[in-house]
Amino acid sequence: MTLSSPRDRFRARLAAGPLLADGGMGTLMFSRGVPQGASLDELVVSRPELVSAAHREYLDAGAELIET
């Protein structure tokens, strides 16, 4: 059976077992020079290269779920 939609693939992945998520994106951004008082929500617009690099690194390390 071919899973045609992202929703079908996501449901199949959830059925396969636990899917864990981590909330360490802010800490990672701060460690990369983003000031403590900065709006992390706007980084996806103002510093998209920083956010996408972090997501790539999480995926390369084996993460199955990332969010911004």
Image: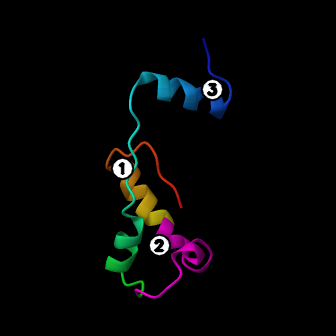
Tell me where residue 35 appears, x and y as whole percent.
Answer: 41, 88
Residue drawn 53% across the image and 23% down it? 12
Residue behind mark 2:
50
Residue drawn 59% across the image and 77% down it? 42
Residue 49 among magenta residues:
yes
Residue 48 among magenta residues:
yes
Tell me where residue 58 appears, x and y as whole percent.
Answer: 37, 54
The secondary structure that dominates the magenta segment is helix
Label 3 vs label 1: CA separation? 24 Å
What range is drawn magenta here?
A: 36-51
Q: 5 above or below 2? A: below
| Residue farthest to the top, as pictured | 1
Residue drawn 36% across the image and 50% down it? 60
Sequence-wise, the earlier of marks 3 and 1 is 3
Sequence-wise, the earlier of marks 2 and 3 is 3
Residue behind mark 3:
8
Sequence-wise, the earlier of marks 2 and 1 is 2
Give the residue type that dot 1 points to.
Answer: Asp
Label 1 environment density (alpha carbons within 10 Å; few <14, some 14–19, many ≥20): few
- Disc 3 is placed on an element classified as helix
Q: Is 23 displayed left or right of 9 in the figure?
A: left
Tell me where residue 13 appears, x and y as whole percent.
Answer: 49, 28
Label 3 environment density (alpha carbons within 10 Å; few <14, some 14–19, many ≥20): few
57 or 8, which lies in front?
8
Q: Is 10 displayed left or right of 56 in the figure?
A: right
Residue drawn 55% across the image and 76% down it? 43
Residue behind mark 1:
60
60 or 34, which lies in front?
34
Tell me where residue 10 appears, x and y as whole percent.
Answer: 56, 32
Give the residue type that dot 3 points to.
Answer: Asp
Q: 28 above or below 33? A: above
